[in-house]
Image: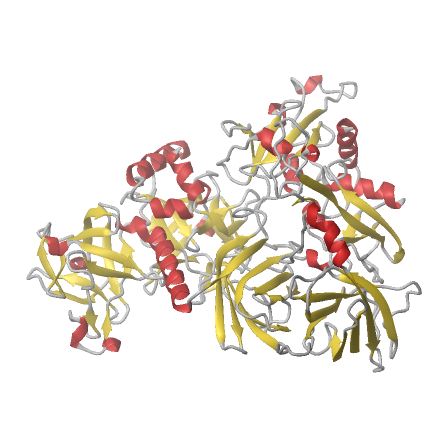
Amino acid sequence: MAFSQDMVSAKMSETSSTSFSVIHPTSSEGQGPSPRHLSVMHPVVAKKISFYKSGDPQFGGVRVVVNPRSFKTFDALLDNLSRKVPLPFGVRNISTPRGRHSITRLEELEDGESYLCSHRRKVQPVDLDKARRRPRPWYSSRAISTQAHSSPPTAPAAAAPGMLRAPRRLVVFKNGDPKTRRTVVLNRRVTQSFQAFLQHLMEVMRFPVTKLYATDGRKVPSLQAVILSSGAVVAAGREPFKPGNYDIQKYLLSSRLPGASHHVYTKGTARSERRKSSNWKVSIITSDLPNSGTSSQIYIILYGQHRSSAPIYLSGTDGAQFQDGREDIFTIRVGDIGTLFKIRIGHTNSGLSPSWHCKEIQLWNMNSGKKFYIPVQRWLARDQEDGEICREFPVLNKGRPMLPVTVYEVHVATGELWNAGTVANVYISVYGEKGDSGSRQLFRSKSSFSFLRGQTDTFSLEAVHLGDLYKIVIGHDGLGPGNGWFLDDVVIKDPTTNREYAFFCHRWLDQGEDDGKIARELYARDNSIIFVRQRLELSRRETWAAERWKFMKGNTLQFYNKLTGGFVRLHPDGTVDALGEKTDKCGLFDVIFNKGNMCIFQSHVIRHLSLAVDNSTVTGMASGGACTELRVLYQPNRCALLESALVPGHTVIFDRHGKRAAESSAGYADLSKEFVVFVKGVFLNSAVVLLATSLCQALCLQPDGSCTGVGSQSEKSYWKVHKISSGICMFESVKNAGMYLRIKDGQCDGTGTGDTDCHFKIKKNLENASVSLESTKSPGLFVGLESDGQAKPVIYTKNGNVFFYPQVVKFGRENPMGMSATPSQEEEKIHETKNQQETPAAFEAKRSLLSSTAKSNRK
């Protein structure tokens, strides 16, 4: 069966397809011993090969048939694998299972073998036996017994007596014909690849299927998007999407959206639950307002003191429910939920006219005889009121207080990293001591566009009061280009109690980053002050990890004070001020001692004196004394404090006139103890540098020649400096020798050849120690970044998209041009330099942030 599937995949690669599954035809690189042996009579040798994801044992692998007809070049294979293996920048490297040997030609691939795919040179090995046994993500495992059962390692997963595995079902509608629908099971056989899945749908639907859409018309471009869909897709040929009443069935519940909970009960209690279940009669009256009826599927959830019911879809036999002015009555069976205290009513927002205005709801417990009346009089519509399509209502019980309806204020902060924003649909579930809010889409922000980099969006979430909040589940559906998201934190304000709950994340929700999760469970912080302190401490650690290289022994530094507008100077008589010019030799300091963040800064010209803090003021003292040991404390704004190691709390401080001062000598506004730190000799000839774009990202050359600011701070982001004249340099990629950063014809990329298009003037920014790169051929145009991190020429602004923070990997030489080493020699020197400088104790913080970089350097 596996062989036939591979042959189907190979066949489909020869036929035309849509933009999201096309295999680009290119020229052959040869599969025979020599070109003259290739002829029309030469047999085509097909290799069946398995590819796995670097460092991800949960990825079950993909099987591909490789032959000269399906893949004529190695790049064509990489492009095809990029659509099947979820990596942030696509598949750019193939290696043997242990990552020791890279594959660069089709001829090196062996039939029947397995290989690892990665988007960087460094590969993380994977236990292939574990990956092959790993259940696919569309299988759910739920415990049905509290007793653990063991099985032999070789036993199939389905045979484990303590687990119940159910393949996920998907409803597939025919485009433009909602009445034609089929249910398919997402199992291993039909989901080897996206092309194989389309082929399976073609057999099921009995018409050519080349494209898939979500029920609201968004394109579903990949197998991962199918798995993460809400449970229904629309199958189409080459025609565009046709709107229709694509209602999903009641077993495809809205609770499957990110953050929804599922109730699981043991076998031993299942029978007792059925005995305690109750019959309820539900009466729903639709308003008689114009267009108040709906074409969507209505569901209801009952919340009791013991538990809540699952979403119950309300549907009849005549298909004409919930029309203007009509009363619809249903009988439903609900388990023992205890005393009812609230309900949630909503719909799936499907069909041609999904908007709905509900007038009232009546509930009757046919077992106890209790009746409940709920006046609704609200729209459930995206284009009405607040845009919500589900609402909660409290239920009045005799002798019990009724919970209030609360409009929570939800503040969602997207991180500052480049490409941190997302265009995917974001959902949140809020949990409190009195239930949960259910999965709600965050779609109507007070900002014009939601979830942009560095932006905090504010949403309103209406629910019956949840009591004290303790956790949230937040995630996105993974749809749309650039759907990955870096979430900083969520703050929820409860206007009823006037309390704030903080939920700290500071992680990626991205299939290609971090642990690959696109939904996270976050717990509330007990105290907002502690939360702020934790955020500040984390920010300081990250900033120190990014700036630590500046304080390596042997570096020459300058300290710029933004309040005085001058550099710190140490005079021969031992006095210190902050009025120096950039070229003042008295403002240069050598790092002669370094231990963690403790340093001694010796004057570059007055060798016997170093900066010191004595009697709470800064002065010059003999090098080596206890007062000369200063602790560097970095702030989130990339400014450093210089604190006495002998007397903690005493720092180097100046007044606005540049004179040394103590903290008690003037008002706080007239004092400054923050310094921007510059390193001398960063852009000397043949230096190798990183152009950092954030605390953990850097400007990187992509395989297609484009440049992005979301690269990792690793070897592929190294640039070799070619100094043309004072303040003018070229930047050559170390990994791709001969490719230079350039601005030409309105584009910024890395395909330059070393001509004048590649010459850049270095503009140093005193406010944050960054640099900006201005084209000398096109004055006024700088290397800049778009919100997704892509490089482009821009006009200089101070919004941060032209700021690059250089980090020296290898210092260069004074004499310009003519003495640069070969690329291979440069790489050897880079490794030597980093191995000498980056000791395990010195860079522990940076390794925790950039583990892959540090591991690569140690190798």
577 or 451, which lies in front?
Answer: 451
**Which quadrant is home to the N terminus?**
top right
Describe residue 812's horizontal placement relative to residue 414 as left or right: left
Residue 782 rendering spot, x and y as whole percentages: 46, 60
Residue in the image at 29% along x and 37% along y: 836
Residue in the image at 77% along x and 32% along y: 5
| Above or below for 731 versus 32 | below
The residue lying furthest to the left in this view is: 573
| Above or below for 2 versus 212 | above
**Which quadrant is home to the C terminus?**
top left
Describe residue 83's horizontal placement relative to residue 298 as left or right: left
Residue in the image at 75% along x and 20% along y: 39
706 or 138, which lies in front?
Answer: 138
Describe residue 630's horizontal placement relative to residue 290 as left or right: left
* Quarter where residue 358 is shown: bottom right
Describe residue 370's horizontal placement relative to residue 558 as left or right: right
Is residue 371 visible to us here?
A: yes
Q: How many marks?
A: 0
| Above or below for 755 versus 330 | above
Is residue 485 visible to us here?
A: no
- How is the protein colored in the picture? secondary structure
Residue 143 rendering spot, x and y as whole percentages: 65, 44
Residue 106 rendering spot, x and y as whole percentages: 63, 27
307 or 5, which lies in front?
Answer: 307
* Quarter where residue 345 is shown: bottom right
| Above or below for 77 versus 851 | above
The residue lying furthest to the right in this view is: 318
Residue 658 rendering spot, x and y as whole percentages: 19, 71
381 or 361, which lies in front?
Answer: 361
Residue in the image at 85% along x and 72% along y: 322
* Quarter where residue 715 is shown: top left
